[in-house]
Amino acid sequence: MSTDVLQVQGLDVFYGSSQVLFNMSLSVRQGETLALLGRNGAGKSTTMKAIAGVIPAKHGTVHLHGKVITGRAPHLIARAGIGFVPEDRQIFPDLSVEDNLTIAIKRDVDGQSAWGLERVYDMLPLLSPLKNRLGGQLSGGEQQMLTVGRALMGNPSVLLLDEPSEGLAPIMVQKIGELIETLRALGTTIVLAEQNLHFCLGLADRAVVIDKGSDVFCGTINELNANAEIKQRYLSV
């Protein structure tokens, strides 16, 4: 039976005096890909950042493997098993590709290292010939691949991908989709934030639709695809 690796319950998040998440809740099962869908500004990135500890939650809890991680520093949340690929990538532009990867090396929560340099280069062959190139000299798509590789080097229990296809050329969007599909086939637990429903259709198992900081739908991708009202009202489809 599937077990929940990640549980988010009743998150309220503020930027200053403005509330941006309202009682946000979701759960992710072992080996599942969950899509967070919604228009720009709906609260997808804020949800990701709150899980990763980048911004604090005023109320609510996040459980990872049954343990509360809410309120921990971001580096301790990463150490507990959350791998975060932010929307703006945040690579180190003055370090080489290989240094960007090796700086993120850590074992998983059980002390194992399933992901290392060789396996990341095998998974992301585009990076291997660029290993000595500075991060700031990479294209947007190459930087996105590097950021995913860096997250994998930390051997995460859950991989958070925030808008991985945004702003990329169609060929790179296709490559990112193929990468996610491969990671999913390997049993990686993924939370994928996207505006593009069509990008998620073949990648995700379930979806949470977010609107104005609240979860307004949770169900399988097939259930969402069959729900014309939800798609039209919240996803402009």
Image (tube, rainbow, N blue to C red):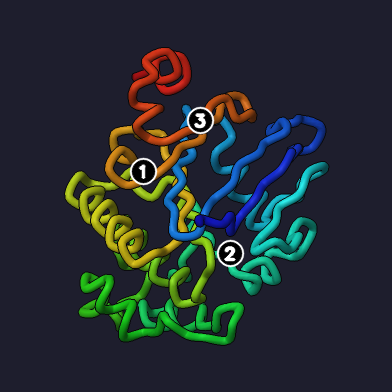
Q: Pointer 2: what residue?
A: 82
Q: Which mark is residue 166?
A: 1
Which x, y percent locates residue 224?
Answer: 40, 27
Mark 3 vs 2, N-terminal side: 2
Numbered disc in front, either 2 or 1? 2
Compared with 21, 133 (above or below) is below
Residue 131 visible somewhere in the drawing: yes
Marks 3/2: CA distance? Answer: 22 Å
Looking at the image, is 193 positioned above or below residue 186?
A: above
The residue at 76%/49% (across/down) is 61
The quarter holding residue 17 reads top right
Label pair 2/1, CB-CB below 8 angstroms = no
At x 23%, y 52%, the residue is 172
Tell me the quarter of the picture where residue 190 sits: bottom left
- Residue labelled with disc 3: 209
Disc 1 versus disc 3: nearer the observer: 3
Secondary structure category for the residue under label 2? strand
Amino acid carrying mark 2 in the image:
Ile
Q: Residues within 10 Å of mark 3 (few under 14, many from 20)?
A: many
Q: Secondary structure at mark 3?
A: strand
* Residue drawn 48% across the image and 30% down it: 38
- Give left or right: position of 34 versus 47: left
